[in-house]
Amino acid sequence: MFINGRNAILEALRSGKGLEKIFIMFGSEGEPVNQIRAEAKRLGIACIVADRGKFLQMEKEAGLGTRSQGVIAQLREIEYEDIEAVVENAWIDGRAPLVVALDGITDPRNMGAIIRSAECAGIDALFFARRNSAIVNDVVMKTSAGAANHLPLDRVANLGDMLLRLKKSGIAVVGLDGQATTTYTQYDFTTPTVIVVGSEGEGMHARTKNLCDTLISIPMQGKVTSLNASVAAGVVFFEAQRQRQTKK
């Protein structure tokens, strides 16, 4: 797997997530590139300078979905974590677990943006289904600005089954739904919670929605009646953070 973008690669280096080689296009300079070189040298990871023609060919062969900014890194396949183990560790640490489930998010840019907001807001982990979902690729990594290297991620066989298991362990399932009468500020996020984010067009699948203990919405004041999925998710994540910080 290849990832690109200066911030994404720098965060991958800092997280210690299995970078094997870094390729830098000849002439690429600036503080971020210098930081990448320094961090790679510290970790013993080879930085290979390639002329423009060779680099552009490598960029093409890697099938990157976004511009590389003159830096490409070869990364071992992403290592998914066990969402139930992450939740168990939160219980052991004496914290109420707060995790996110993505239901039908197929746009990698949306996924990356949601991962970035989740990591910044202190979410414990994020999971999604193997089917009907974007995969964690270079676009996700770059859009997340490297947050995908820090936030535990899990790719589960069946989203509904996992939600059911988490419910049985004592975690409430809360879904974002534009038609819900309960607003996101009315929900108590200091309790153990799974926040479910559905796709922009169709929302959550029927089974997922039926598994939700509570549906919440974000009140709209303008003429446009909906938000981008990643924006809506970010609003809710930081409300959860605000409530938890206030409780502390």
Image (cartoon, helix red, strand yellow):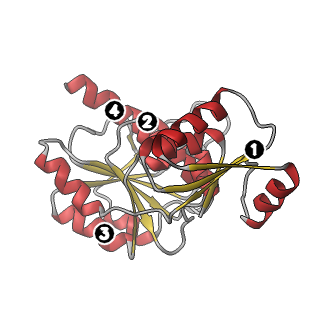
Q: Nearer the viewer, mark 1 or mark 3?
A: 1
Q: Disc 2 versus disc 3: distance between alpha carbons?
A: 24 Å
Label 2: state its secondary structure: helix
Residue bearing the label numbered 1? 70
Q: Could you tell me the amino acid type at mark 3?
A: Met
Q: Quadrant of the N terminus?
A: bottom right
- For image coordinates 21% across by 47% down, the residue present is 192
Q: Nearer the viewer, mark 2 or mark 3?
A: 2
Q: Earlier in the sequence, mark 1 or mark 4?
A: 1
Q: Disc 1 versus disc 3: distance between alpha carbons?
A: 40 Å
* Image coordinates for residue 154, horizontal then vertical, percent: 38, 63
Marker disc for residue 241: 4
Label 1: state its secondary structure: loop
Do the residues under discs 2 and 3 have CB atoms within 8 angstroms? no
Q: Earlier in the sequence, mark 1 or mark 3?
A: 1
Q: Earlier in the sequence, mark 2 or mark 4?
A: 2
Q: Could you tell me the amino acid type at mark 1?
A: Gly
Q: Quadrant of the C terminus?
A: top left
Q: Disc 2 versus disc 4: distance between alpha carbons?
A: 10 Å
Q: Could you tell me the amino acid type at mark 4?
A: Gln
Q: Please, is residue 147 above or below residue 208 in the view?
A: above
Residue bearing the label numbered 2? 120
Residue bearing the label numbered 3? 162
* Image coordinates for residue 5, horizontal then vertical, percent: 66, 44
Category of crowding for the residue at label 2, using alpha-carbon neighbours closer than 10 angstroms: few (below 14), some (14–19), many (at least 20): some
Q: Nearer the viewer, mark 2 or mark 1?
A: 1
Q: Earlier in the sequence, mark 3 or mark 4?
A: 3
Looking at the image, which is closer to me, 85 or 79? 79
Q: Disc 1 versus disc 4: distance between alpha carbons?
A: 36 Å
Q: Disc 2 versus disc 1: distance between alpha carbons?
A: 26 Å
Q: Disc 3 versus disc 4: distance between alpha carbons?
A: 24 Å
Q: Earlier in the sequence, mark 2 or mark 3?
A: 2
